[in-house]
């Protein structure tokens, strides 16, 4: 019997600094605008004007694989400016708000930035060309991940700034409030880096934990028919769209 009254799973982001929840919330990824996308779109329009027959999917501004991943999940942004300087292997930073002294009405206060001990991931960081310690942004955010799900934390797939990159990890669901501290590989050596307020730091994706059937097999004639059908759909228009593919019943 169907349960029409079952609740939808709920993902909750909770800020220990109420003003941050109002002024710099964690937002759906589709609402985040990256600077590079405007210049890419302008370039695409220029090419399209000069050569209307140009395949739109061969340009980064229109690639569905890129655009789709950029629109999935949620974006965590820095709620304040960050200035970082590494000089002679020493890590220094400052922010306009001293979060460790913030008046938040509870004892959960800590500096906005910190470092993990270099012995934890030092060799791996160095192999990536990063600073020997993981930079930890200790945000005021908590998350409640619904039971039966996991929150996947990923780097931004196509960011504007390439001086740092979030690590990847999972938070399990049903484990109560969990801190959303952003762990960063830091690539800017012996230079000063300014991260403006509102800069995206990482991306979140809610993943359902479930068993699925996986099959690996040799191709059949149906697979070849499907490939020919797909090729016809995506190559028969100058302005292509993958939405037409979703209207077809695919037999395997």
Image: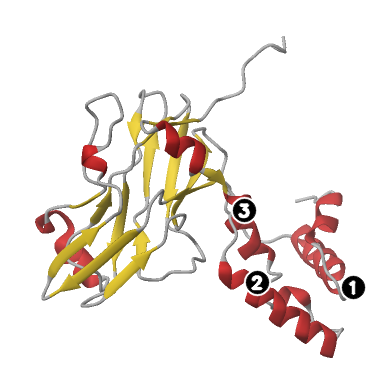
Nearest the viewer among 120 and 61 is: 61
Count of labels in the image: 3
| Residue 21: x %, y % from top left | 47, 36
Q: CA distance from mark 3 to mark 2?
A: 15 Å
Residue 26 seen in the current view? yes
First in sequence: mark 3 or mark 2?
2
Left or right: residue 97 versus residue 197 is left
Q: How many neighbours does mark 2 have within 10 angstroms: few (below 14), some (14-19), or many (20 or more)?
A: few
Q: Secondary structure at mark 2?
A: helix
Say which quarter of the image contains residue 118.
bottom left
The residue tagged 2 is 38
First in sequence: mark 3 or mark 1?
3
Placement of 100 over or under 90, stated as above or below: above
Placement of 126 over or under 33, stated as above or below: below
The residue tagged 3 is 71
**The N terminus sits in image quarter:** top right
The residue tagged 1 is 236
Q: Secondary structure at mark 1?
A: loop
As drawn, the label of residue 49 is none
Nearest the viewer among 72 and 111 is: 111
């Amino acid at each position: 019997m169907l349960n029409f009254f079952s609740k939808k799973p709920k993902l909750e982001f909770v800020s220990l600094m109420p003003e941050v929840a109002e002024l710099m919330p964690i937002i759906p990824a589709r609402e985040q605008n990256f600077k590079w996308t405007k210049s890419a779109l302008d370039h695409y329009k220029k090419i399209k004007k000069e050569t209307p027959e140009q395949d739109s999917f061969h340009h980064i501004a229109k690639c569905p694989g890129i655009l789709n991943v950029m629109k999935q999940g949620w974006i965590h942004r820095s709620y304040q400016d960050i200035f970082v300087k590494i000089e002679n292997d020493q890590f220094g930073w400052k922010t306009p708000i001293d979060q460790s002294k913030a008046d938040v009405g509870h004892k959960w206060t800590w500096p906005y930035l910190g470092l993990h001990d270099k012995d934890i991931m030092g060799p791996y960081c160095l192999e990536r060309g990063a600073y020997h310690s993981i930079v930890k942004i200790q945000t005021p955010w908590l998350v409640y991940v619904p039971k039966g799900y996991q929150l996947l934390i990923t780097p931004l797939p196509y960011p504007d700034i390439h001086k740092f990159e979030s690590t990847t990890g999972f938070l399990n669901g049903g484990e109560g409030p969990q801190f959303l501290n952003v762990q960063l590989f830091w690539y800017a050596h012996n230079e000063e880096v300014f991260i403006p307020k509102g800069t995206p730091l990482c991306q979140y994706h809610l993943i359902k934990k479930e068993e699925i059937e996986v099959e690996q097999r040799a191709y059949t004639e149906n697979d070849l028919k499907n490939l020919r059908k797909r090729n016809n759909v995506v190559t028969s228009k100058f302005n292509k769209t993958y939405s037409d593919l979703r209207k077809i019943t695919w037999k395997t």
